[in-house]
Image: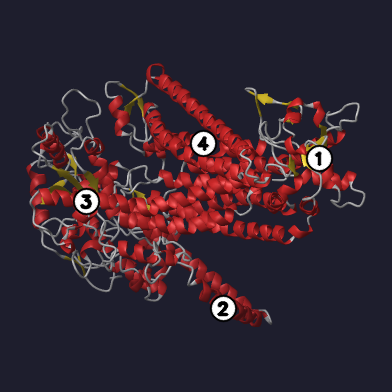
């Protein structure tokens, strides 16, 4: 609103301000007030002859002054130009002033603000009549909660008489306007009267042969009676032996619970933008005046406008195929919102098309359903809520309705399916505002984050592919690869890699060395540094974009403390006296006893999480044992397989085994984490979801990344040397080949990341289709054994068609977030070992985004709208991953790759600064006769006396044989120095 308190100062304020209305004496309640009310109710519509005596509002005075009508006002002439009736529709006064201000355009642009003058006049007459101080007697005394009037000595409960408000068309307010404004009325979205919309549906089956049927019937009866007591309207229908309880929320229920839930609802349009328009107009006029006065400036202005116009038209030609198609999804105007209050309902545009939308209606009805009790055999604190009834089989399903079929023209579902969920539209931006309106804020924010993450992956993918192309082009010029491949017939014999392995020739790892160079090359450092900056930039830009969405969707004032407590939380504390007062709602609530309930649950939850993490490490040991056994089996069976092939096959096999163990443990983790979080007694749903998210992600992090961390930082680092190997449980540790463990790390990453994404994509496409077939088979069997007439599928009602769809639970979005955040970890934490990770992530996300949309629209019941402020704890997890990625990439480059040894060799050992001789620099020599175990493994290599291994140790001829050389410590110091520089540069 305009701040016009000081719009007029000095004498102007005294001259043009209308005299205040004198306070009227308060009539005594009783027969007089009843008579006044009756007279007012029967009073006919009259005309207010100008000028009317009600005081003008401050913004009216401002407009009077700017429009130059002060003289008319002082002369008591009509500033309206004619008589205005009380029941006229249209904000005549405001519209005419805006017409004067904008030259007649405001009346055309502001068709929605058509009730302000009528309401203004009603309130003027209300203020003049003095009835604002009277009290009215309610129809039902028992319906009041505020008791007596403290100023009167009467026992009758009295209520202050409210100000006049607009009258509503009941049909317009009894259902969402998009339902009845269609050309063809979809009757399956309404009750039998085709006026009241179906806001929620409960479905159940009856089976007289079951022993619990009578009990279930009683639960349904009591539960539905409680719903009716809350003001909801129900209607029962039967179809194919399935009963559907259709629920409608009347306007009064919506208003009451919108206030209880503190929903932010759109306010009426105001004249707040008049001054903005005026100021912008003044600036434009000033710039135009300067361009005329300064010589040559007008020419520059015209030429620059021409250039910018041509550039804009060229860009718009290409961008119109990328941006949201406004022919199908018109741009929504931003509306100011505020927390709804029935006392201030005159501030809200309750007649606006999207005031009580289908999403808001379903959310209010679900809030009521979650808190209604039903009878139980014995005293049970948890005998309430539709979720419990569905779990016990009393009801089959509870869901809101889609607004039509995906082929029904004119419905939002059809528009979203055709122009958003289609894979053919992968290049277009998402219609986020329409997604939010249809599915709610929570799902809208998920798709906003997923789209922005995919958009940012485009840059990372281009750089990653460019680095890979560089490594491929420069492969033929890499000297160590040439040395390995040209020594295929030489006598460079390598020591065995395990206790059961044989000696092998270095030339056998030619292909393995080529793969290693594609990952371990000079571009790796650049890409790792780039991805560290990219991760930071992504989070910062997302915060900015998220703030824009938060402002556009009016989430800035949302406070988690405004959330109502979870019904499960209140049920478990039902027998505890309220000991705390919520500072937002000012309502007393029970506090969880710390020593008796909170502490034991937290300790138990922590202990189980630690046990599950230990179980993940046991799975890691099993994978390591499998890899060692596979490598030994491939070398011992005498098939003549080369060492490089055996290493690759063993690594790939272990990665697949690890992937299978991941899915088995994931199933266990999800169920245990939800049970543990329920024990912790979190007050709100947001707190519950955040705690559950942290638990599951921690367990999944260990589950997915443990084997990768092992290969990256531990495998081959503490093995000892031939003759004195370090053993664990009398077993020798795994050892890397001559090229290091980076290739193994890349194989592990590629199989887990790509394999997981491919498997999840297949599940997302075919699993919903499978369960929908199962649901359809169940319905068909009920028709067959119920002796019902075979129905026409084309005439199935909306609630029947939606019943066949899959349920969308309150936490169904959690796996989607988890999958993307785990992928973000693969893209950032280990990107130095797999430069193509962003590219594969980009391809997956383009498909994932459209498949998720299609799954929501075609395979699932419509989700109930949920309001959140942001993506929640996921942002903190992403931030921690970004910080961790800087550390891990620095250590991978320093300790896992050969980047630092190559730099040391070029700087200190190479005579010409090249890598000639680098291969021999990285190998040490061992005398076979110094180890009895190696003598027994010689076999076909009985003529050799020494073997090579990858390390920096003294030769057998040295007085300090097999001790670490000074070169090892120089390289170690350089590695640590690189880590420090790398961490501080990011």
Q: Pick whichever, 538 or 154, lies toward us.
A: 538
Distance from label 4 to label 3 (Cα)?
A: 37 Å
Residue farthest to the top, as pictured? 595
Distance from label 4 to label 1 (Cα)?
A: 35 Å
User: Which corner quadrant holds the N terminus?
Assistant: bottom left
Q: Pick whichever, 563 or 681, lies toward us.
A: 681
Q: Position of residue 87 (x, y in %)?
A: 18, 64
Residue 27 visible to the viewer = no
Q: Nearer the viewer, mark 2 or mark 4?
A: 4
Q: Which mark is residue 923?
A: 1
Q: Which residue is mark 3?
A: 777
Q: Earlier in the sequence, mark 4 or mark 1?
A: 4
Is the residue under label 3 in contact with that under label 4 (CB below 8 Å)? no
577 vs 864: above or below: above
Distance from label 1 to label 2 (Cα)?
A: 66 Å
180 vs 339: above or below: below
Is the residue under label 2 in contact with that under label 3 (CB below 8 Å)? no
Is the residue under label 1 in contact with that under label 3 (CB below 8 Å)? no
Dot 4 falls on a residue whose secondary structure is: helix
């Amino acid at each position: 609103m305009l701040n016009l308190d000081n719009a007029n100062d000095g004498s102007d304020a005294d001259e043009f301000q209308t005299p205040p209305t004198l306070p009227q004496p308060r009539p005594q309640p009783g027969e007089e007030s009843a008579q006044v009310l009756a007279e007012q109710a029967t009073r006919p519509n009259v005309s207010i002859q100008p000028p009317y005596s009600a005081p003008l509002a401050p913004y009216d005075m401002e407009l009077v002054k700017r429009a130059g009508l002060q003289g008319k006002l002082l002369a008591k002439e009509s500033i309206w130009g004619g008589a205005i009736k009380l029941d006229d529709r249209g904000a005549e006064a405001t519209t005419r002033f805006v017409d004067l201000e904008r030259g007649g355009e405001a009346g055309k642009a502001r068709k929605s603000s058509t009730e302000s003058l009528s309401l203004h006049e009603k309130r003027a007459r209300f203020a003049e009549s003095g009835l604002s101080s009277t009290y009215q007697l309610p129809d039902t005394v028992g319906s009041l909660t505020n008791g007596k009037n403290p100023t009167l000595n009467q026992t009758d409960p009295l209520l202050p008489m409210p100000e006049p408000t607009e009258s509503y068309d009941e049909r317009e307010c009894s259902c969402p306007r998009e339902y009845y404004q269609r050309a063809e009325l979809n009757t399956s979205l309404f009750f039998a009267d085709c006026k009241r919309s179906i806001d929620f549906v409960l479905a159940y089956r009856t089976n007289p042969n079951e022993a619990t049927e009578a009990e279930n019937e009683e639960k349904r009866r009591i539960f539905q009676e409680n719903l009716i007591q809350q003001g909801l309207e129900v209607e029962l229908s039967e179809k194919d032996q399935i009963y559907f309880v259709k629920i409608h929320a009347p306007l009064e229920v919506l208003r009451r619970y919108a206030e209880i839930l503190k929903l932010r609802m759109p306010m009426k349009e105001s004249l707040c933008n008049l001054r903005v328009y005026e100021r912008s107009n003044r600036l434009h006029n000033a710039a135009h005046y300067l361009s005329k006065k300064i010589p040559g400036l007008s020419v520059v202005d015209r030429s620059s406008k021409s250039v910018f116009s041509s550039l804009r038209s060229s860009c718009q030609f290409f961008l119109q195929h990328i941006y949201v198609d406004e022919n199908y999804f018109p741009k929504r105007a931003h509306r100011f919102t505020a927390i709804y209050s029935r006392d201030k309902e005159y501030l809200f545009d309750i007649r606006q098309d999207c005031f009580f939308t289908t999403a808001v209606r379903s959310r209010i009805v679900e809030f009521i359903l979650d808190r209604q009790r039903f009878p139980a055999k014995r005293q049970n604190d948890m005998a309430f809520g539709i979720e419990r009834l569905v779990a016990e089989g009393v009801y089959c399903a509870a869901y809101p309705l889609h607004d039509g079929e995906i082929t029904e023209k004119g419905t939002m579902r059809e528009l979203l399916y055709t122009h958003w969920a289609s894979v053919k539209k992968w290049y277009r931006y998402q219609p986020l505002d329409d997604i939010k309106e249809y599915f709610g804020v929570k799902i809208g924010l998920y798709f906003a984050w997923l789209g922005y993450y995919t958009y940012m992956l485009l840059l990372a993918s281009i750089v990653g592919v460019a680095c890979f192309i560089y490594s491929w082009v420069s492969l033929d010029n890499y000297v160590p690869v040439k040395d390995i491949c040209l020594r295929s017939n030489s006598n460079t014999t390598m020591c065995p890699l395990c206790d059961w392995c044989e000696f092998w020739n270095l030339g056998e790892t030619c292909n393995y060395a080529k793969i290693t160079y594609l990952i371990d090359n000079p571009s790796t450092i650049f890409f790792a540094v780039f991805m560290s900056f990219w991760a930071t930039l992504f989070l910062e830009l997302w915060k900015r974009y998220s703030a824009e969405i938060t402002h556009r969707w009016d989430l800035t004032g949302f406070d988690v403390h405004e959330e109502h407590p979870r019904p499960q939380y209140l049920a478990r504390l039902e027998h505890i006296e309220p000991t705390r007062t919520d500072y937002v709602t000012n309502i007393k609530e029970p506090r969880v006893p710390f020593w008796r309930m909170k502490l034991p649950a937290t300790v138990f939850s922590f202990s189980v999480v630690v046990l599950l993490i230990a179980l993940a490490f046991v799975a890691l040991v099993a994978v390591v044992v499998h890899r060692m056994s596979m490598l030994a089996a491939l070398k011992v069976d005498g098939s003549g397989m080369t060492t490089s092939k055996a290493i690759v096959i063993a690594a790939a096999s272990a990665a697949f085994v690890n992937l299978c163990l991941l899915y088995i443990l994931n199933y266990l983790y999800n169920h245990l984490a939800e049970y543990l979080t329920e024990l912790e007694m979190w007050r709100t749903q947001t707190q519950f979801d955040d705690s559950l998210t942290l638990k599951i992600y921690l367990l999944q992090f260990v589950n997915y990344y443990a084997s990768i961390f092992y290969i990256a930082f531990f495998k081959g680092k503490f093995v000892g040397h031939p003759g004195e190997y370090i053993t664990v449980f009398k077993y020798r540790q795994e050892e890397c080949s001559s090229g290091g463990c980076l290739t193994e790390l890349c194989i592990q990453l590629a199989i887990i990341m790509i394999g997981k994404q491919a498997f999840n994509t297949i599940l997302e496409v075919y699993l919903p289709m499978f369960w929908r077939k199962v649901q359809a088979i169940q319905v068909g069997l009920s028709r067959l054994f119920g002796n019902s007439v075979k129905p026409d599928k084309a005439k199935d009602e909306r609630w029947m068609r939606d019943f066949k769809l899959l349920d969308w639970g309150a936490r169904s979005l959690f796996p989607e977030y988890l999958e993307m955040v785990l992928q973000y970890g693969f893209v950032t934490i280990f990107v130095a070992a797999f430069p193509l990770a962003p590219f594969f992530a980009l391809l997956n996300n383009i498909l994932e985004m459209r498949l998720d949309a299609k799954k929501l629209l075609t395979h699932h019941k419509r989700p109930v709208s949920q309001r959140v402020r942001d993506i929640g704890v996921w942002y903190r997890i992403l931030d921690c991953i970004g910080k961790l990625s800087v550390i891990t990439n620095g250590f991978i480059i320093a300790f896992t790759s050969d980047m630092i040894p190559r730099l040391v060799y070029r700087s200190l050992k190479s005579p010409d600064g090249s890598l000639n001789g680098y291969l021999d620099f990285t190998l040490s020599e061992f005398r076979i006769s110094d180890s009895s175990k190696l003598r027994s493994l010689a076999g076909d290599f009985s003529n050799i006396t020494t073997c090579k291994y990858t390390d920096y140790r003294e030769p057998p001829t040295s007085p300090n044989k097999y001790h670490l050389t000074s070169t090892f410590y120089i390289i170690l110091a350089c590695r640590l120095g690189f880590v420090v520089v790398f961490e501080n540069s990011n």
